[in-house]
Image (cartoon, helix red, strand yellow):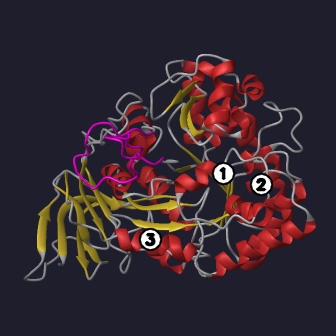
């Protein structure tokens, strides 16, 4: 059905415009933006006066992989949710699974460096499942430096995945930080050769681990400068901690010199990962400025009491998801560190959204999916799954005034889409409202939009997203989720 959004404040970061106008959607694309547009006879006409109309948010860093998780992200204004930091493979099977299950939002994946290395080192076939990937994170065998034969094997697998539609290479270097830095340069060389970006969780900073083979940020910036690859620095807020000024200063210098580097951040002082991660070993925590009590198990709510308990859980259940508090949002100094990571010029908002974990009941195993809406009680995740984008709007637009609404849409929609322009022509139609753009559109109440998810109630949906359309199909109408809507499509690379 064609749709006319009448009389809203239309913000298009693609043309740097912010004006009162109508937006006409036809055949899943933006047909026109202007005043007093005439709707086709059978079009749906929606009065959006007093509301903000803009391109739907593009999340480069989402691990939700489920209908429940995508619905939470839809309520947060997201229309495209991509897993590019970790990735999944085989890419064909990952996309086929999502297509078969249905998705409210657009989706896509990078080629997984972790899974490729596990195949080369362990003969473990890649499995397109986020939970299987988390189980790998504590396995030390794939984390070691590869032999020349193993390196050739996983590089070939990554290259093959790029030809099949992977959107780049996802590199969890922070989970294997003792590997030979030359391996990372090989990844960058491959990316540059095929015109695909990399998305890296960098290894530890020198301040956190003086024994690191190379500072994580310096490694990424060096690889970008030496190879010419387009390289994206994931969640700079959580890997830089209280050293954010040093990291961003180096980032700006390299970018000014012409390197193709981009950076993302999310507005929380806590992260989430598998408790078996390398950097959560008890002996590593002092370098992060935390103790075991900063870790809370997601599925049970248990706060890790001491080093003995941490070692026990890492040994018995290394894939267990946990919350890791690394900055105190109630502390003004830590809050300022977080603010600077978001305020940094051209910093992109990305959620690092985690799966929603459902408890085991009546002897059945824990569920990985939930189609019921509103979500039933008991689901556990990080609040960033439900609130990253609306919290960023609240903090940076409504409360601090650091961003205009136009700047907010630039960082939440336009800039992330542009990261993928070279590798995915389909992305060129996203993140803006020009004629012919995909009708991935969000309509926001600028007065009420805010996050509501907390660490104690992490699946509480955000508020203020009045309408959300994906390829012109309504997913949210008048603030209500349309549970029969699965218009999401795969976004593929063309390396």
- Asked if disc 2 and disc 1 are in contact, CB closer than 8 Å, the reply is yes
Give the Cα separation between the discs numbered 1 and 3.
21 Å
- Residue at figure coordinates x 38%, y 37% from the top left: 394
Mark 1, residue position: 136
Question: Per the image, is 364 magenta?
Answer: yes
Numbered label attached to residue 142: 2
Q: Earlier in the sequence, mark 1 or mark 3?
A: 3
Q: Is residue 388 above or below residue 282?
A: below
Image position, residue 13 (x, y; %): 44, 62
Please, which residue is most extreme toward the front here?
A: 363
Image position, residue 154 (x, y; %): 77, 69
Q: Earlier in the sequence, mark 2 or mark 3?
A: 3
Q: Is residue 373 above or below residue 83?
A: above
Q: State the residue in front, 275 or 476.
A: 275
Please, which residue is most extreme toward the left here?
A: 41
Q: State the residue in front, 492 or 422.
A: 492
Mark 3, residue position: 97
Residue range in magenta is 354-381
Q: Where, quadrant-wise, is the N terminus in this rendering?
A: bottom left
Q: Where, quadrant-wise, is the C terminus in this rendering?
A: bottom right
Give the Cα separation between the discs numbered 2 and 1.
8 Å
Image position, residue 458 (x, y; %): 37, 36
Q: Secondary structure at mark 2?
A: loop
């Amino acid at each position: 059905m064609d749709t006319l959004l009448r009389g809203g404040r239309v913000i298009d970061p693609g043309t740097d415009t912010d004006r009162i106008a109508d937006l006409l959607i036809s055949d899943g694309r933006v047909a026109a933006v202007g005043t007093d547009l005439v709707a086709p006879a059978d079009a749906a006409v929606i009065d959006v006066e007093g509301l903000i109309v803009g391109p739907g948010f593009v999340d480069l860093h989402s691990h939700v992989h489920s209908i429940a998780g995508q619905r939470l992200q839809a309520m947060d204004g997201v229309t495209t949710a991509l897993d590019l930091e970790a990735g999944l493979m085989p890419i064909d099977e990952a996309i086929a699974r999502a297509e078969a299950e249905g998705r409210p939002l657009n989706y896509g994946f990078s080629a997984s460096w972790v899974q490729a290395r596990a195949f080369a080192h362990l003969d473990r076939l890649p499995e397109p499942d986020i939970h299987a990937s988390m189980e790998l994170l504590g396995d030390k065998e794939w984390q070691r430096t590869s032999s020349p034969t193993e390196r050739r094997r996983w590089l070939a697998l990554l290259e093959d995945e790029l030809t099949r539609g992977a959107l780049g290479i996802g590199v969890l270097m922070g989970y294997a930080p003792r590997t030979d830095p030359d391996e990372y340069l090989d990844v960058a060389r491959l990316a540059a050769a095929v015109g695909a970006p990399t998305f890296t969780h960098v290894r530890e900073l020198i301040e956190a681990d003086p024994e690191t083979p190379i500072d994580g940020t310096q490694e990424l910036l060096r690889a970008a400068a030496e190879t010419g690859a387009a390289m994206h620095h994931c969640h700079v807020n959580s890997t830089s901690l209280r050293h954010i000024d040093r990291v961003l200063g180096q980032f700006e210098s390299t970018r000014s010199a012409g390197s193709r580097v981009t950076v993302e951040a999310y507005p929380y002082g806590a992260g989430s990962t598998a408790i078996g991660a390398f950097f959560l070993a008890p002996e590593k925590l002092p370098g992060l400025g935390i103790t075991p009590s900063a870790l809370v198990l997601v599925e049970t709510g248990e706060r890790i009491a001491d080093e003995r308990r941490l070692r026990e859980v890492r040994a018995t259940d290394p894939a267990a998801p946990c919350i890791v508090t690394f900055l105190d949002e109630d502390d003004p100094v830590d809050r300022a560190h977080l603010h600077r990571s978001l305020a940094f010029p051209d910093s992109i908002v990305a959620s690092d959204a985690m799966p929603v974990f459902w408890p085991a009941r009546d002897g059945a195993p824990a569920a990985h999916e939930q189609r019921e809406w509103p979500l039933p009680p008991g689901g556990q995740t990080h609040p960033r799954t439900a609130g990253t984008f609306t919290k960023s709007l609240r903090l940076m637009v409504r409360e601090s005034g650091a961003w205009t609404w136009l700047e907010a849409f630039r960082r939440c929609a336009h800039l992330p889409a542009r990261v993928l322009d070279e590798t995915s022509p389909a992305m060129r139609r996203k993140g803006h409202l020009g004629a012919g753009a995909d009708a991935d559109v969000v309509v926001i109440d600028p007065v009420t939009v805010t996050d509501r998810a907390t660490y104690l109630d992490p699946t509480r949906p955000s508020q203020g997203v009045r309408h959300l359309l994906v390829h012109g199909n309504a997913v949210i109408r008048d603030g209500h989720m349309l549970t029969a809507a699965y218009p999401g499509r795969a976004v593929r690379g063309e390396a």
